[in-house]
Amino acid sequence: EDSKRRVFVSRRIPENGLERLRTLCDVDIWEGDLPPDRETLCTRAAGCHGVLSMLSDAIDPDFMDRVGPQLQVVSNYAVGFNNIDVEEATRRGIRVGNTPGVLTDATADIAFALLINCARRISESERSVHDGKWKTWEPLGFIGLDLVGKTIGIVGLGRIGQAMARRCHGGWGMDVLYTSRSSKPEAEGEFDADYVSMDELLTRSDFISVHCDLNNSTSGLFDASAFQKMKSTAVFINTARGSIHNQNDLAAALTNGEIAAAGLDVTDPEPIPADDPLLDLQNCVVIPHIGSATVDTRAAMADIAAENVLRALADEPMPHCVNPPS
Ligand code: 8YV
């Protein structure tokens, strides 16, 4: 009926989320295999009260203008929200939601999987088997790095960083160093972690894993000078956001032997262009932003993202709001 609130969902999400939305709203879903282009996004969202958005949607003032003043909530299908101008949304009274918590372990699993993959050269050695290049077992073939007892440097000790620290410290007995906006005494207790400067983390770590959010102070944080400070045997893992590392500088560091290997679940841009130099390097593993991609996690994200929309439209507290009304 006419009184139903209208919600636009910018990609097909797990059915449980859509069902939840449909109980109270008129739901329009972009069904394309690729994200809607800018024009389509704005046109389809125009007149909606809620938008369930993806990282690939730029939710900026122009978008908000084009959707219209009835827009009450933008619910991102992600824990991150660097695609959204939150300050502008707040100014307009638009609530912004995200999906923290439920993707913590899935993402830390992918970070740890990349770490073992890079240390033990799994992708590289598998390629050689697939390509028919594996001719004989060799005493010095595909020699990699041990993990047990090494030092892991964690950049950003939030939920996902802590889940990574738990795997590294609890499972593999690694020493944990971390940088973060502030020290985390509880986490230091659990992982025996040391809060250090960025320089100390770079120079002392055998492995470095990025778990901070993307902002002005973390954009380009891993550049040529950072890679130069790292051990030549070090492995760099990024499952956070691609623009936290400088991709050309990383390719140079991997080519020149300044670091040993890199594992990336995120690139800048995404998808990574087919001619990116990183894709020619045997010591670089690139996977397509699958940190949260498990059946349970994506379903849980869909529940929260839908609930964020419904609560905001009912003027009730949202499960996860990044700009709650003051
Ligand atoms: C996204 C992510 O959910 O949550 C995040 O911030 O990066 C991923 O889990 C995924 O890219 C879909 O937007």
Image: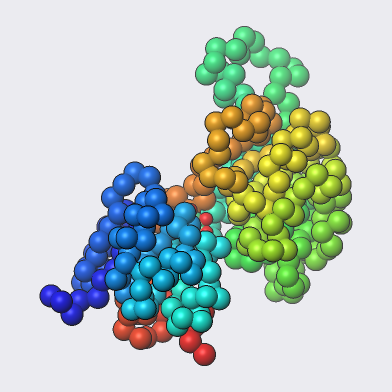
Q: Nearer the viewer, residue 305 or 166?
A: 305
Q: Nearer the viewer, residue 90 or 52?
A: 90
Q: Nearer the viewer, residue 224 or 311?
A: 224
Q: How many marks?
A: 0
Q: Is residue 299 left or right of residue 218?
A: left
Q: Is residue 190 left or right of residue 40?
A: right
Does the rendering let one see residue 306? Answer: no
Q: Where's the N terminus, which quadrant? A: bottom left
Q: What residue occupies the far bottom of the structure in this picture?
A: 326
Q: Position of residue 163 (x, y in %)?
A: 61, 60
Q: Position of residue 185 (x, y in %)?
A: 74, 74
Work out whether 27 lies above or below 223. below
Q: Position of residue 45 (x, y in %)?
A: 33, 64
Q: Position of residue 63 (x, y in %)?
A: 43, 65
Q: Quadrant of residue 273?
A: top right
Does the rendering let one see residue 18? Answer: yes
Q: How is the image coloured?
A: rainbow
Work out whether 38 lies above or below 48. above
